[in-house]
Amino acid sequence: MMKGMDETPPADDLAQGAIEPLEPLSRRLAPTRQRLRRRTGTGDPELDARIRALVESIEVDHPALLEDIVQTAFVMARSADRGEMKLVSRSLRELSRAFRIFGPYRGRRKVSIFGSARTQAHEPEYVAARDFAAEMSRRGWMVITGAGPGIMAAGHEGAGAANSFGVGIKLPAEQEANAFIARDPKLIDFKYFFTRKIAFIKESDAFALLPGGFGTLDEAYELLTLMQTGKAAIRPVVLIDPEGSRYWHEWRTGVEEHLVANRLVSADDLSFVKLVYGIPEAVEEIERFYANYQSARYVGERLVIRLEHAPTPEQLARLNAQFSDLVAAGAIESIPTTAEELRDNDVVDLPRIAFQPKYDFARLRQLIDAINAFATPAA
């Protein structure tokens, strides 16, 4: 029998990644939700036994999760119509292909670039996207765009095909992939916007947005919503206004005058985005986000933040004083690598801090900025 097949997966096997909610154990396994997370099988013991035997006969990572997926497919087949089955089948194939293509590049950071498909090569927005992508590529980053024309083509032109991914969408008005990525094996075409968005959110370590239409604004608001609610990992988001443009400046002014002023969002929520006016400023903002901060995950009720440099006692004291409103109990403290992280081989060699936070992700974004101000180790 394969390891883990007779065990209920530990709660923290639901470890937070780029597209998993950043939530403590009590919230993930609240009594009203626990029943939904428990694997109950198909309701047919004979079928469950056959599924388990099949999974046990195959050497595969995470067999309990595979068993759950297969069981869920059989349960769905009893009530879903043909259209619903096609939707799920196609979605799984699209996600599987995306995971497979991105897999070999897990060790490299990636930035997604969003903007208008209608932007022409001579326009300042195109030049800015191209130059930004080129500079990020020189610094070891890879670039992800929607693979179409305009800003998307500019990103691929700047980064070069070797450092690019194309995450395309099939539209009724056929839009071919731009010439810089068209025949590259890292081009992925999606039928559904939601699976495409999962790929963007899951694979990106940063986001850069240039002026664009409905699609660009949709992507901007979705990023803000996911980070504001803790449904995606916090990442740096830069809004680039090229020379002569006031697009994002006026967007931010509108948000401040209508959303913040009417208390529809908090002023702190604007911490999730940074308005910049040039390529050096955009690059600096993204790299500053990772100057000290590396990643975060919950272990039980505590949020564990992995760092490049361990904080000094004086720096910890400053964090506790500045962010006391974010701490639900106890204090922000340095800790060793937890048993759960060791079990998962999850960034085990870096120093870390931990605390039990309140549910305020905008303040958490500000905490990350404060941590990054400690980027240079004390002499």
Image (cartoon, grey):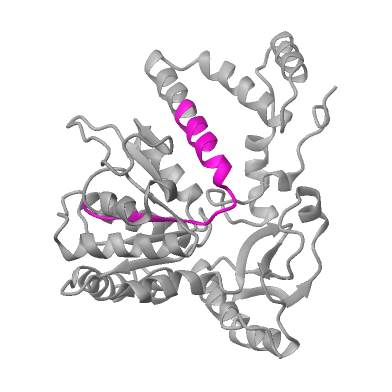
Q: Quadrant of residue 51?
A: top right
Q: Nearer the viewer, residue 374 or 25?
A: 374
Q: Nearer the viewer, residue 112 or 76?
A: 112
Residue 235 in picture, x, y percent from top left: 49, 62
Residue at 36% in and 75% down = 280
Residue at 73% in and 45% down = 11
Q: Residue furthest top?
A: 46
**Which region shows up in magenta?**
93-116
Question: Which quadrant is home to the C terminus?
Answer: bottom right
Residue 38 in picture, x, y percent from top left: 69, 34
Q: Quadrant of residue 146?
A: top left
| In the rendered image, the vertical position of residue 177 relative to residue 327, given as above or below | above
| In the rendered image, the vertical position of residue 115 relative to residue 358, given as above or below | above
Residue 229 in picture, x, y percent from top left: 48, 58
Residue at 46% in and 62% down = 228
Locate residue 163 relative to residue 46 in the image: left or right: left
Q: Quadrant of residue 155?
A: bottom left
Locate residue 310 relative to residue 242 in the image: left or right: right
Locate residue 152 relative to residue 1 in the image: left or right: left
Q: Nearer the viewer, residue 166 or 116?
A: 166
Residue at 19% in and 68% down = 247
Is 97 magenta? The answer is yes
> Total number of numbered labels?
0
| In the rendered image, the vertical position of residue 175 relative to residue 327, given as above or below | above
| In the rendered image, the vertical position of residue 20 relative to residue 285, given as above or below | above
Residue 106 in picture, x, y percent from top left: 58, 48
Question: Which quadrant is home to the N terminus?
Answer: top right
Is 273 magenta? The answer is no
